[in-house]
Each structure stands twice: as structure tokens, then as C-alpha cells.
Amino acid sequence: MKKIVLILTCLCESLLGFSQKKSVAVTPTVYYPEAKEWQIKSPESVGLKSDKIQAAIEFAKSHEIKNPRSMEVNHYQTFGKEPYGIGIGPFADRGEPTGVIIHKGYVVATWGEPLRCDMTHSVTKSFLSTVVGLAVDNGLIGSVNDTVYKYVPPIEVYGNPVARPAEDYGKPELLKPFDTPHNRKITWDHLLRQTSDWEGTLWGKPEWVDRPSANPAEWTTRPRNTPGSVYEYNDVRVNALALAATGVWRKPLPQVLKTMIMDPIGASNTWRWTGYRNSWIVLDGQPVQSVSGGGHWGGGMFINAYDMARFGLLCLRKGRWKDQQLISENWIKQALTPTSAEPTYGYMNWFLNTNQKLLPSASPNVYYHLGNGTNMVYVDPDHDLVMVVRWIDNKSLDGMVKAVLEAF
């Protein structure tokens, strides 16, 4: 009798669709755009309010920065006023206020000229820190806590005259950017966090000329801060990091970025990462340009908004693109870790919103890559949101973020 009951029970369960097996959770597909193709979806189709998105676009357009559209003119009205402020890299006129909004990986809005290749200024630093991260991931740099000078041999500047002038007799012929008692203490981590207080002159720019103190008497005389103790945003030191990284990779950094990041994420072939006209070195018998970490004296990354958005999406996905972990998740975590010297700054140029000072309307979990212009790549893990905003007034950034978040 018990066997008959068991058989009937199993038969009923089979007919009613019951199963003794545990249900398998189905992981929703995460969308990644293909190269040269990025799916566009209406705001409504991904749960956003269309009228609010349109209002945000109008806000961005109506709050264009008032600076000249000529980046060269803009330079000489701002940073060009600093000592030794002459431009030494290329400048270019910029375009209209521009942006891209990405939700759940899909393009839900664009405005302006998203295909235009413009200077992105200090967002370049985020690409630089990524290339350094790739060197760590690939074992070329053992640890970010290693001192940099161990990795940097004497460097020959390309284009020096064959016959040295008499006034150069006895002067060093090779660059040794980390060979001072202070600079020997600097680690990769210090450079990445802009806490190195690196001392010296590179590409004709002394480190004290970038945003110099109001007191000229201390420009060259002040005591050095212990590496890691004081944060100071300084493009000369950023360029010293780029030079060191170039030597580690033994190839131009744009080639590393293209092969290992930009091509795999389907970026266009129009972006260009440049240095200065005097930042050429001899590397393995060839002239190689050491690129800059921004447009402070010209140069840096020239890139369109879609490519910036792809990089932002890579960050949002914690370094993963489809089935490839392009940069380690651990590196992304490190880049988002602050220091006591500056709690709102991770690795360059990963700005953290922990104190919600610049973006009070956004979550503390938000971070953003920021450059002059203003150029911003906004990454919001809570909303699965990436936003590129270009040529907006810096004081209007929070208004723009607030307008977009009202669409949720």
C-alpha cells in the first residue's frame, strides 16, 4: 500500500509541475556595447522619466562654462599666468556643451557633439593611473608601496645636440627624476594620490610653478613634506609619474592603453593622448614621447564623449568588460580608497563623493573623474548610471546631477 501511495504522489507532482530539485537562479544579462554600436533606449523603457531627462539636458546646455572655447586662449587667461606658464603642448578649440547618459549600459540620452574629439584635461589622469594599475596587475610594478626610484634608470632626452655647449660642461647629461634624498622616499602610491611632494623640474616646468604659493619667497625654499602626509594637486608631479610608467612599460603609454583597455571596450580610433613638444626621450634606441597627465600646458587626452562613457562603464563594472577582467577589481577598489591626507581623493583622478561637498545631491557611493572645462565622467553604482558632462560650469555640476537623479 505504501508503494502505491508513493507512486501516486510522484505522479501527481509530475502532472502538477512540482519538482524536488531546487530552482536555479537566472542571472540577468549585463549589457555591454559592441564596438561601433551602442544600443539606444528611450528613458521610459529603462524606467526613467523622459521629461526629467530632457530637463537635465536643457540644464546642461544652459549652464555652459563662460571660458573661451579656444583652449589656447583659455590657457593664457588662467594657468598661463603662472610662472613659466607658456604652453608647450597642443591646444584645440572645444565644441558645444556635450554629454551622454548611460543607464543599465544603454544610451538613454545625448546632447551636443558626443562624437567630437575634444581635450578632456585632467580626466587624462584617470587613464594614466589605469595604465599604472595595469603595470601592477601584470607584475611590472611589484607593489604600489615600492619606491619609484628603483624602477627608473637614468633617462636620455631625445634631440640633445651632438656637441654640447661649453656652458653645459660638467652638468648631468641624463635625467634622474627620483635621485634626490627626498624623491628616493616616494612610492608609486604617493604619486598616484598626489601626496609625494616630488621636487624638481621636468619638461621646463619646476614643480613649484603649478598653482604656486602666494608668497614667492617660499617657492624654492620651503621644507619638503614627508611623502604621503600632504595632498597637493600638481601636474608636474603627475608628468613625473607618466615618465616613470613609460620606462616601466618600455613603450609609449597610449599604446598600452589602446591595446589593453580602449580596443577591448570598443572605443573609437579617434582618441589621441599627447605629451609636450619637448617631452621626448630615447627608449630602446627609439624616440618616445612621454605623455602628459592633463592639458595644463597643452596636450593630454583628446577624446569624444562616447569613449569617455565606455571608460566610465568599465569603471562601473569594476574593471570587467564582457568575459574579460581588463583591470583587476582589486585595483578599482584601491583607486576608490581615500587617505587621511585627502579623504575625497583616491588614485588620480578618482574623486570620491564621501563628504558630498561637490555633489551634495548624489550618494556618498558616487565617484567621478574630473577635469578642467569642466569635464566629468560620473559613475553611480547605486543607480547603474554613467554620465559624461562636458563644458559645463563647475558650480552647476550638482544641479546637473540632481536633475538627472530626479528621473529615477
Image (tube, rainbow, N blue to C red):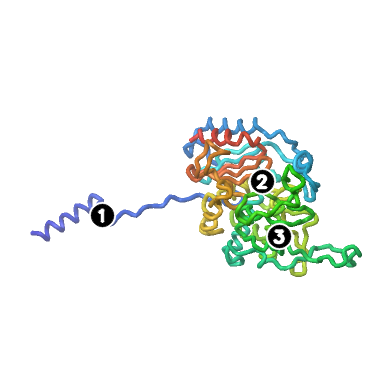
Residue 376 in sight here: yes
Is the residue 390 above or below the residue 132 in the image? above
Classify residue 26 as left or right of residue 12. right
Q: Earlier in the sequence, mark 3 or mark 2?
A: 3
Cα–Cα gap, marks 1 and 3:
63 Å
Judging depth in this view, the residue of 50 and 241 nearest the camera is 241
* Label 1 packing within 10 angstroms: few (<14), some (14-19), many (20+): few
Q: Which residue is mark 3?
A: 243
Is the residue 351 above or below the residue 97 in the image? below
Q: Quadrant of residue 141?
A: bottom right
The tag on residue 186 is: none
Cα–Cα gap, marks 3 and 2:
25 Å
The tag on residue 304 is: 2
Q: Which residue is mark 1?
A: 19
Cα–Cα gap, marks 2 and 1:
53 Å
x then y, percent, for residue 134: 60, 61
- Secondary structure, mark 3, is helix
Query: Which residue is farthest bottom?
Result: 284
Judging depth in this view, the residue of 193 and 370 nearest the camera is 193
Amino acid type for the residue under numbered disc 1: Ser
Q: Earlier in the sequence, mark 1 or mark 3?
A: 1
